[in-house]
Amino acid sequence: MGTVSELKAGGNDGNSAAYANGVADGQMARAEGNSLTLYLQVGIDDYAKGFRAGFFGQMNLARGLEPR
C-alpha cells in the first residue's frame, strides 16, 4: 500500500478565466436587477462560483477580516 498524500487540484494558483467571467456577469446581473437561475444558485463550477461572488459582492470578504 502507498501513503496518502495531500491532493492539490491543478489551477488553484489564482482565479480561472471562467471565475473572472462569472464575477463580471454577476455584477452586471445585480446592476440590472436580474434573478439567479437554479444553476447559478447551486452550481459548483468556477463560473457559477464567480457569478455568485459578483452578484452578492463577496470578492474580498477575507481581506476585511484580517487582524489590525
Image (spheres, helix red, strand yellow):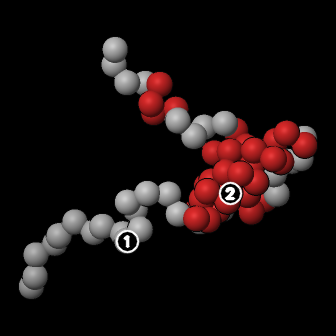
Q: In this view, does 14 lie above or below 66?
A: below
Q: In this view, does 15 lie above or below 7?
A: above
Write the residue at 10% across / 82% down.
2
Q: In this view, does 18 lie above or below 61?
A: below
Q: In which quarter of the image is residue 40?
A: bottom right
Amino acid type, label 1: Gly
Taking the image as drawn, is residue 42 in sight? no
Residue with the mark numbered 2? 22
Whole-percent x, y for residue 65 in the image? 43, 24
Residue with the mark numbered 1? 10
Structural crowding at the residue carrying mark 1, measured as other residues with C-alpha within 10 Å and reported as few (<14), some (14–19) or many (≥20): few
Write the residue at 45% across / 33% down.
62
Left or right: residue 29 versus residue 51 is right
Of residues 63 and 48, the one drawn nearer to the viewer in this rendering: 63
Q: Which residue lies furthest to the top in this view?
A: 68
Q: Quadrant of residue 38?
A: bottom right
- Discs 1, 2 touching: Cβ within 8 Å: no
Mark 2 secondary-structure assignment: helix
